[in-house]
Amino acid sequence: MGTLQLSIHGLATTSSVPRKFNFRSRSSTTHLRFSTPKIRAVSTVPDSESTAKDKEPDDPPAVDFAFVHSVLLPDGTPDVHFRRACGGQKLRDIMLDNNMELYGPYGRPLLNCAGGGTCGTCMVEVVEGKELLTPRTDKEKEHLKKKPKNWRLACQTIVGKPDSNGLLVIQQLPEWKAHEWSYEKILPTEEP
């Protein structure tokens, strides 16, 4: 059993609770811990000196994504990609715009419907953040009636609204995954 800790700089989540991914391959289990970056104050500005134009604008609302690939890396660790996108878009468009593998062996033009919702080849598994997604459409209900409830068609799934914030953990190509893993939140530990 090995432990791998990743430091994710700049990935903001709506909660300050670190995330833990447990991956089970043939020979061992790997624990991945993802935590939010720490911020340290350098100095303060008295109220009399601060003005409206000195303030930095807030970050625009965005949804953070953790895409877990269906195949492990050569060293046996999972291939996890972190992205950020604005809400109100289809999950398929977000994945393709960020060069995330969506179709696997069905990636050729004649083997998928290009987002029409008729082929069912853009299935993903939503591990966390399903509250950010729109409900299943009739096309999804038809294609995914024998699949788990957390599987969705990326071409039919809209991620939140333009002002949405949150974290979405997506398993790519769930029907082709070569390893089992679980996801759980870890309570923050007190540091001395």
Image (cartoon, rainbow, N blue to C red):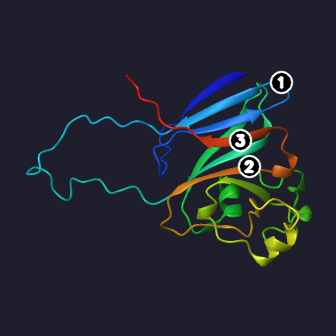
Among numbered discs 2 and 1, the one appearing first in the sequence: 1
Q: Mark 2 points at which residue?
A: 171
Of callouts 3 and 2, which one flags the residue occurring earlier in the amino acid sequence? 2
Foreground mark, 3 or 2, reads 3
Task: Name the image quarter holding residue 27.
Answer: top right
Are the residues flagged by discs 2 and 1 in contact, CB closer than 8 Å? no
**Residue that label 3 marks:** 182
Quick check: marks 3 and 1 in contact, CB under 8 Å?
Answer: no
SS at circle 3? strand
Residue 65 percent coordinates (x, y):
60, 51
Q: Residue furthest bottom?
A: 138
Q: In this view, does 52 lie above or below 139?
A: above
Residue at 41% in and 29% down: 190
Residue that appears at 27% across and 36% down: 41
Q: Nearer the viewer, residue 128 or 37?
A: 128
Crowd rating for badge 1 (residues with CA inside 10 Å; few <14, some 14–19, many 20+): few
Q: What residue type is labelled 1?
A: Ser
Q: How far apart are marks 2 and 1 (CA)?
A: 21 Å
Residue at 74% from the left image edge and 75% from the top image edge: 137
Residue type pointed to by label 2: Gln
SS at mark 1? loop
Which is nearer the N-term, disc 3 or disc 1?
A: 1
Residue drawn at 49 percent across, 42 percent down = 17
- Mark 3 and mark 2 residues within 8 Å of each other at the beta carbon: no
How many angstroms separate mark 3 from mark 2 (CA)? 11 Å
Q: Which mark is residue 27?
A: 1
- Does residue 15 appear to the left or right of 21 in the view shown? left
Q: In this view, does 59 lie to the left or right of 92?
A: left
